[in-house]
Every structure is written in structure tokens, then in C-alpha cells.
Image (cartoon, rainbow, N blue to C red):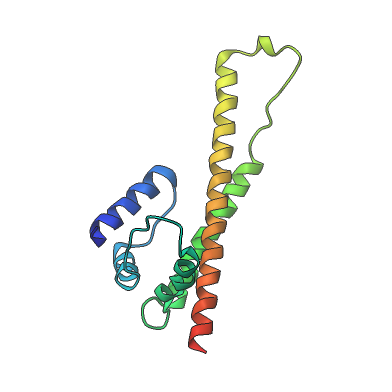
Amino acid sequence: MGPTRIIEQYFSYCEELCQGFEPLARSSLFTILDVCKSSTRKSLQGIDYFAADAGEGFEASEILKENQIRSFFGRMDRERQKASSKESNIIPMDIDNNAGENSNEEIELDLEALEDFQDIEAAVEETTVIINTFASAKTALETSTT
């Protein structure tokens, strides 16, 4: 699969599942794909080596400046903070003994609020995974250069 197709799939994924998320620019993505050659894995065998080699893509002095990386993860952190602030702004649902009196519209709105909360929760978890991956890659890069 060519780099252009991979980037198109990445943008589609971000558009569908990460609404409001601003992905990296095409030129940055092409640079990353040039360094980290894509491959298809048919099993989980060797996944530790795959994770250890992730640092190869983060040769910050040659490919991406460290401030670009910090900027990217700063955006991710701001998104996480927005998500947590939205989480605190959710109006608690009223639950009373006369649940039968609630209109279908009220119940539907409550369910939508719950789904939005779950989407935000998933985005925060995904952001945490990305931040942890970055930290591992940065550590691998630092140990390989010293």
C-alpha cells in the first residue's frame, strides 16, 4: 500500500472517529512514512520488536524538530483537557420514581449525553496510549543516541 493511500486512510479515520482532532500535516506524515516503512503483520509474534523499533521514526534532530513533536502532543493534551472539561459540564440525569412520566424526547437526550460522554472517555484513553507510545519512543531514541 502506498504512502498516499495510508495517509488518506489516516485522514478518514480521524474524520470518522476523532471529530475536532487536527491531524498532522501531509508533509509531516510523508516524512514519518518515509522513515517508518509500512508493513503488514499477520500475527502478534514479534510485537515487542515492533514497539522497540518505533523509536526509529523519531530521529528528532534529522526528521522532526522536537518542538514540532511537543506541539503535536501539546494539542493532544489540550484536546484531553477539553474532553475532561466537557465531562464536568454534563448535566446529571434526573432519576425519579416516576420514570414513566419522562417523555421519549427527554430520554433520548439523556442517552445522547451518555453516548457523548463515552466518546470523550474513549478519546481520552486513546490520547493516553499515544502519549505513552511517544514517551517510549523518545526513551528508545535517547538510549540509542547515548
Q: Position of residue 95 (x, y in %)?
A: 72, 21
The quarter of the rendered structure image containing the N terminus is bottom left
**86 to the left or right of 15:** right
In terms of depth relative to the viewer, which is nearer, 138 or 114? 138
> Which residue corresponds to the image point at 37% horizontal and 82% vertical from the top-left?
62
**102 to the left or right of 126:** right
> Which residue corresponds to the image point at 49% horizontal and 84% vertical from the top-left?
144
In terms of depth relative to the viewer, which is nearer, 140 or 107? 140
Q: Is residue 75 shown above or below 55?
A: above
Q: Position of residue 71 (x, y in %)?
A: 47, 68
**91 to the left or right of 5:** right
In terms of depth relative to the viewer, which is nearer, 139 or 96? 139
> Which residue corresponds to the image point at 51% horizontal and 60% vertical from the top-left?
130
Q: Is residue 4 shown above or below 142?
A: above
> Which residue corresponds to the image point at 25% horizontal and 55% vertical from the top-left?
5
Quarter-wise, where is residue 108 in the image? top right
Quarter-wise, where is residue 121 in the image? top right
Q: Residue furthest right?
A: 97
Q: Is residue 87 shown above or below 99?
A: below
Q: Position of residue 51 (x, y in %)?
A: 48, 67
